[in-house]
Image (cartoon, grey):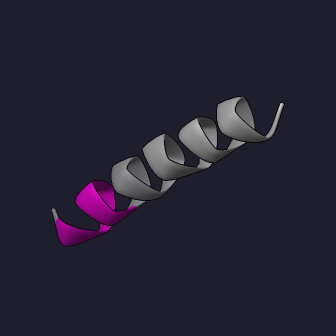
């Protein structure tokens, strides 16, 4: 459960960072 939450959070943050960086 915790792993899934962390992975999802990391993915969301990564996607947001990518969008902002572009």
Instruction: Give the answer, above or below, for where 4 lies relative to 16.
Output: below
Residue 4 shown left or right of residue 2 in the figure: right
Q: Residue furthest right?
A: 22
Residue at figure coordinates x 60%, y 49% from the top left: 14
Instruction: Give the answer, above or below, for where 3 lies relative to 21.
Output: below
Q: Nearer the viewer, residue 14 or 8?
A: 14
Give the quadrant of residue 18: top right
Residue at figure coordinates x 45%, y 42% from the top left: 12
Q: Nearer the viewer, residue 8 or 1?
A: 8
Residue at figure coordinates x 64%, y 46% from the top left: 17
Where's residue 21, x and y in %? 78, 41
Give the quadrant of residue 22: top right
Q: Nearer the viewer, residue 10 or 17?
A: 17
Quadrant of the image containing the N terminus: bottom left
Where's residue 2, x and y in %? 19, 69
Asked whether 12 falls inside the magenta stretch, the response is no
Instruction: Give the answer, above or below, for where 6 lies relative to 18.
Output: below
Q: What secondary structure do most residues of the magenta stretch adopt?
A: helix
Magenta range is 2-6
Residue at figure coordinates x 47%, y 57% from the top left: 10
Residue 3 shown left or right of residue 10 in the figure: left
Q: Residue furthest bottom?
A: 2
Asked whether 3 falls inside the magenta stretch, the response is yes
Count of picture labels: 0
Q: Nearer the viewer, residue 2 or 11?
A: 11
Q: Residue furthest left?
A: 1
Residue 21 shown left or right of residue 7 in the figure: right
């Amino acid at each position: 459960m915790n792993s899934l939450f962390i992975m999802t959070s990391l993915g969301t943050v990564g996607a947001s960072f990518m969008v902002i960086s572009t």
